[in-house]
Image: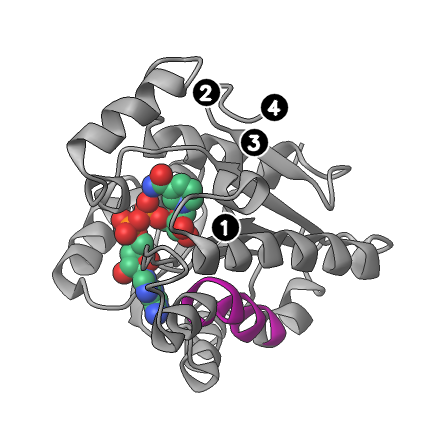
Amino acid sequence: MVVLENRVAIVTGGSRGIGESISKELAKYGVKVVINYYSSKEKAELLVEEIKELGSEAICVKADVSKEEDAKLLVDAAMETFGHLDILVNNAGITRDRTFKKLTGEDWRKVIDVNLNSAYNTTSYALPHLLESDAGRVINISSIIGQAGGYGQTNYSAAKAGLLGFTKSLALETAKTSLTVNAICPGFINTDMVAEVPEKVLEQIVNKIPAKRLGKPEEIARGVLFLCRDGEYITGQELNINGGLYM
Ligand code: NAD
């Protein structure tokens, strides 16, 4: 088991939804958190205060992780503030759901940029620092949609499936080191992202989930905690947290 106290984590899109829960869960165990936000400045600043109340440290950094230069600024901020880096959680993501017939090139590129190219951007700058840690972790938040496909989600599904290939290949390349690289594939989790799904469609989705409910952001966060703390010999894996929807 890895002692998490005083480890440093970057959580992209870490100020709300699943990212917020991950930031808080890690902070509870003494991890210093670099909360990346894109638009929710106030939420990010509030979360920094909450984390300080939990007894840990945090900063928030505005960065559009779909841009390489912003990803560099994010990693630089972590290093300048805390001096080392142990955990990178690539959580930032968006959807632009449309059936393929209606999907524009802009919808395609934007979703690939934010969900997939962002992981290249952050990981390429973070990797040298993560390899210096004795328990480095890259955790990519993929999706059940990357495994099973999703109606109206060719762009999102391709990006999330791409993250799985990225995870396994980087895990292979780093397996001899103390860095592990894994993906978490959430099912349908109760956040703003799912709130965009029309109520009737959501009802049908919940009916199909064997557990008969949406997942909670905290349930994904506990998966991240598990991989960080107990995952020394777990690399290149997909951790499915989906109420049994995809087995
Ligand atoms: P959310 O919309 O609440 O959060 C997404 C986060 O990403 C936000 O903090 C947002 O600001 C950030 N973000 C978006 N674009 C960004 C950019 N260019 N740069 C930096 N940050 C950016 O949604 P969520 O449900 O919390 O999603 C978190 C992750 O989990 C996403 O990758 C999503 O695809 C994945 N996921 C969610 C579900 C679900 O059911 N909610 C299921 C599977 C996977």
Q: Amino acid at mark 2?
A: Gly
| Residue 35, quarter of picture | bottom left
Q: Tell me the element at label 4.
A: loop
Whether residue 113 sits left or right of residue 177 in the image: it is left
Give whichever of discs 3 and 4 has the lower sequence position.
Answer: 3
**Label 1, label 2: how far apart the Cα atoms are:** 33 Å
Q: Which residue is mark 2?
A: 243
Residue at (47, 56) in percent of width and height: 154
Q: Classify the position of the C terminus by image quarter.
A: top right
Q: Which residue is mark 4?
A: 247
Instruction: Answer whether labels 1 and 2 touch (C-beta < 8 Å).
Output: no
Can residue 27 be seen here? The reply is: no
Q: Amino acid at mark 4?
A: Met
| Residue 29, quarter of picture | top left
Q: Which residue is mark 3?
A: 240
Between 27 and 56, the residue placed more toward the observer is 27
Q: Amino acid at mark 1?
A: Asn
Q: Where does residue 152 sit, x and y in percent of width and height?
A: 38, 50
